[in-house]
Amino acid sequence: MRSNELEYVGFWPRVGASVIDMLLQLAIMLPLTYAVYGRFSQPGRLFMGFGDFFLNMLVPAAAVIAFWIYKSATPGKMALSARIVDADTGAPLTTSQSVIRYLGYFVSLIPLGVGFFWVGFDRRKQGWHDKMANSVVVRPGGVEPVKFQSKSDWRNPPQEPRF
């Protein structure tokens, strides 16, 4: 697909994709947590044990990163025909970009979620996690065309306006 046929995916569609992903994660992880512990939580504790931490933190992280590497999208983004790609080339994310993007979620979340809301104001619809991993979320549409650099342009990136 040519880059002039793509558009950046904005805040609200990405929220919708996240809701789909969250519901799928809950549908899978709640029964597994209940099967292991016989309950969903324990008052006064963040995690009920290593199994709870493993099932509800590590497995989802590995699944999301694997989806980004192999499918360029999570199921929620697939439902929107959206893909997560390198911001410069449009190529699929590398493993290191995917890990950085996932860890960037925590950076985006900590200051009251400002890093996620940033998507609504950024010219390329990038959240802080996208900026950290040099990624963009795109889909077919072309309302605001996406422009990627050619490999020959990598050494001389275009200058962003500074405010």
Image: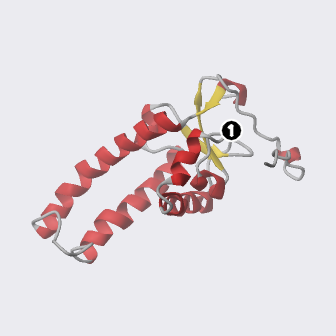
Q: Secondary structure at mark 1?
A: loop
59 vs 64: above or below: below
Give the residue drawn at x 64%, y 28%: 6
72 vs 54: above or below: above
Give the residue drawn at x 58%, y 47%: 118
Give the residue drawn at x 47%, y 50%: 67
Q: Going by the picture, which residue comes out furthest to the left?
A: 38
Quadrant location, the N terminus: top right
132 vs 151: above or below: below
Give residue 75's quadrant in the image: top left
Q: Is residue 123 left or right of residue 100?
A: right
Residue 27 placement (x, y as % from top left): 23, 48
For disc 1, the marked residue is 123
Q: Is residue 5 left or right of residue 56?
A: right
Q: Is residue 145 left or right of residue 99?
A: right
Residue 24 placement (x, y as % from top left): 30, 45
How many numbered marks are there?
A: 1
Which class describes the residues within 10 Å of circle 1: few (<14), some (14-19), or many (20+)? few
Residue 163 placement (x, y as % from top left): 78, 48
The colour mode here is secondary structure
Towards the viewer: 9 or 36: 9
32 vs 52: above or below: above
Give the residue drawn at x 62%, y 58%: 97
Q: Is residue 109 left or right of residue 137?
A: left
Q: Amino acid at mark 1?
A: Arg
Towards the viewer: 40 or 50: 40
